[in-house]
Amino acid sequence: MKSIIDRYNKSKIEQQQLLNPASEVKFWQREAAVLRQELHALQENHRQIMGEQLNGLSVNELNNLENQLEISLRGIRTKKEQMMNHEIQELSQKRNLIYQENLELSRKVQRIHQENVELYKKAYTSSTNGFIQRELAVADDESNTQIRLQLSQPDHFDYETPPRASQ
C-alpha cells in the first residue's frame, strides 16, 4: 500500500513539474538518464548471456546465469518440438492423401488394362491362329497382376545447353 501511495505522490509531483518549462526539461533529462541506465544494464545482460564479460561475476551469479540459460533452452526445445510435431502431422496427412490418390490411380490403370485385354479379345476372337490364342492367354495372365506405383525422386542429370549461334 505504501508503494502505491509513493508512486501516486511521485506522479503528482511530476505532473505539477510538467507545467513549468524548466521542470519539464529536467524531467526529460532524468527520464533519458534512466533509459540510458536500463539500456546499459540490458546490454551487459546480453553480453553475459552470450558468454562475454563473465570475469566480474561471482559463482552464485554464474549459477543464476546458467539456470536462466537452461530455462531458455528448455523453452526453445519445447517450441521446436511442437513445430516439428505439427510438421510431422501435416506430412502424414499429405502422405495419406498421396497414398489414396495412388490407390485410385492404380485402380484406374487396372481398369484400363482390363478394358484393353477385353478389346484385344474381341478384336482377335474370330481368328483361329494358335499364335494369337497364345497371346490372349498371356494377356489374361497379365491382367491378374497388380500394378504398384511409387513416388520417387527424379534422377539428377547435368544437362549442357548448346551454345547459341551468334548472328
Image (cartoon, rainbow, N blue to C red):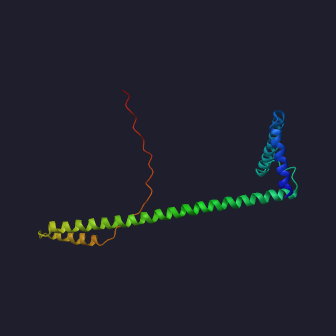
State the image quarter where residue 85 is shown: bottom right
> At 23% from the left edge and 67% from the top edge, which residue is drawn?
115
How many numbered dots are placed on residues in this image? Answer: 0
> At 78% from the left edge and 47% from the top edge, which residue is drawn?
42
User: Residue 104 location in percent, x, y?
Assistant: 35, 66
Q: Is residue 148 visible?
A: no
* Horizontal side of residue 15 vs 155, given as left or right: right
In the rendered image of this protein, does residue 29 appear above or below residue 84? above
In the rendered image of this protein, does residue 156 appear above or below residue 138? above
> At 41% from the left edge and 63% from the top edge, which residue is drawn?
150
User: Residue 140 location in percent, x, y?
Assistant: 24, 72
Front residue of 30/36: it is: 30
Q: In the picture, which quadrant includes the N terminus? A: bottom right
User: Residue 127 location in percent, x, y?
Assistant: 12, 68
User: Residue 97 location in percent, x, y?
Assistant: 43, 64
* Horizontal side of residue 144 vs 10, given as left or right: left
In the rendered image of this protein, does residue 167 appear above or below residue 87? above
In the rendered image of this protein, does residue 63 appear above or below residue 44? below
> At 82% from the left edge and 58% from the top edge, which residue is drawn?
64
Q: Is residue 70 visible?
A: yes
Q: In the picture, which quadrant includes the C terminus? A: top left
- In the current view of this chain or complex, which residue is farthest to the top? 167
